[in-house]
């Protein structure tokens, strides 16, 4: 158990010099955590929520209550470039100032909605799910601030606080975790999520094997010697990352097997495997994001030689 001291209705002091700010999301995952580190009278913000008015107001109230003066941020660090963590970066930078850092391996460009659509069609998406994707046509993620700097090196010094920067790809390329050895903190971004979920998407060509990278980075996370874990979407906990990382690893390994069981000798599109997978779990596939999740598992199974992709982009057992 940890005891957080309330600073504002959505902000808590977790430890001396460390604050958690809860920001609202307009999605089924209702909240994201941003963290404020204060050292030598300077303030650093880790992640900043989505760029909606509601979230920006909630962040503004929290920063004020914590004591951050106007334009008083020295640093905004983005753990990864997902809209719930980095969407507000430009607005926050304009309002609160400071340098903005994102890992050099983070993708700078994303497929446009037109490219997403042609990708989904190539992977066999049809029917209601295709219509939904066509209707949404959402361009994302939001543009990053001008002057964004690549986070380079394995350590980040901020006043008296020194973070080991741990590159943890899989959930998102260029995701980083911040480990403060002396204080025992691990800002774990979206590496360990509860409830357990696929957490990895494959949405375009040339993305390598993100699920394979996730398995590797989870193994490394389990070995990090930190006590206080500060995640992107749940309450912080004590006792280190090992148990959570191991649970996520078992979930992912089991998930890969459940997807593998849906591939057989007859060629199927990735969407057909997705529909079959959803049915095997007692549900129905309705969304392109489910296709992207299953595709991450298919690509990983392909990388490890257990299944194959035909020239017509169909999946079969090896
Ligand atoms: Zn997230």
Image (tube, grey):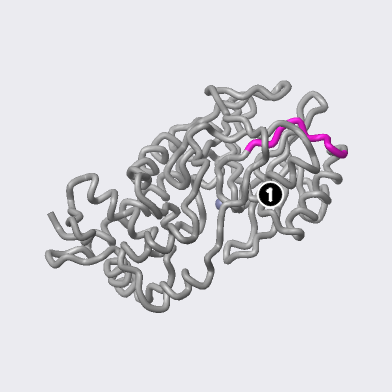
Q: Which residue is mark 1?
A: 88
| Part of the protein shown in magenta | 70-77
Mark 1 lies on a secondary structure that is loop
x and y, in percent, of residue 77 in the image: 64, 36
x and y, in percent, of residue 302 in the image: 23, 50
Crowd tier of the residue under label 1, counting other residues whose Cα lies within 10 Å: few below 14, some 14–19, many 20 or above: many
Q: Residue at x 83, y 37 (%)?
A: 71
Magenta stretch contains residue 312: no
Looking at mark 1, is its residue's CB closer than 8 Å to ligand 1? no
x and y, in percent, of residue 213 in the image: 37, 40
x and y, in percent, of residue 61 in the image: 83, 51
Asked if residue 1 is positioned above or below residue 159 in the image, the reply reads: below
Q: Residue at x 39, y 59 (%)?
A: 292
Query: Which one is in front, 126 or 169?
Result: 126
Magenta stretch contains residue 71: yes
Q: Residue at x 35, y 69 (%)?
A: 125
Locate residue 187 relative to residue 13 in the image: left or right: left
Locate residue 45 relative to residue 106 in the image: left or right: right
């Amino acid at each position: 158990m940890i005891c957080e001291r309330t600073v504002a209705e959505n902000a808590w002091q977790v430890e001396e010099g460390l604050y958690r700010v809860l920001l609202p999301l307009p999605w089924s995952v209702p909240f994201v955590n941003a963290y404020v580190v204060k050292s030598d009278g300077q303030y650093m913000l880790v992640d900043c929520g989505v760029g909606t008015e509601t979230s920006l107001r909630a962040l503004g109230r929290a920063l004020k209550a914590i004591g951050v003066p106007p334009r008083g941020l020295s640093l905004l660090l983005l753990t990864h470039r997902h809209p719930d963590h980095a969407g507000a970066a430009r607005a926050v930078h304009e309002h609160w100032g400071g340098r903005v850092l994102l890992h050099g391996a983070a993708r700078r460009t994303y497929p446009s909605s037109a490219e997403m659509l042609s990708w989904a069609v190539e992977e066999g998406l049809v029917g209601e799910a295709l219509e939904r994707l066509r209707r949404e046509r959402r361009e994302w993620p939001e543009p990053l601030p001008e002057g964004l700097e690549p986070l380079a090196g394995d350590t980040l010094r901020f006043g008296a606080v020194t973070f080991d920067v741990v590159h943890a790809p899989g959930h998102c390329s260029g995701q980083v975790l911040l480990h403060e050895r002396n204080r025992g903190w691990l800002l774990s971004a979206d590496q360990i999520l509860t409830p357990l979920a696929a957490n990895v998407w494959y949405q375009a060509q040339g993305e390598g094997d993100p699920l394979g990278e996730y398995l590797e980075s989870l193994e490394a996370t389990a070995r990090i010697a930190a006590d206080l874990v500060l995640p992107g979407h749940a309450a912080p906990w004590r006792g280190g990352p090992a148990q959570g990382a191991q649970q996520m690893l078992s979930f992912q390994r089991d998930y890969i097997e459940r997807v593998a069981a849906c591939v057989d000798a007859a060629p199927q599109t990735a969407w057909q495997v997705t529909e079959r997978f959803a049915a095997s779990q007692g549900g129905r596939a309705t969304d392109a994001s489910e296709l992207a999740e299953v595709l991450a598992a298919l690509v990983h199974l392909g990388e490890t030689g257990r299944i194959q992709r035909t020239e017509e982009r169909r999946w079969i057992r090896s």
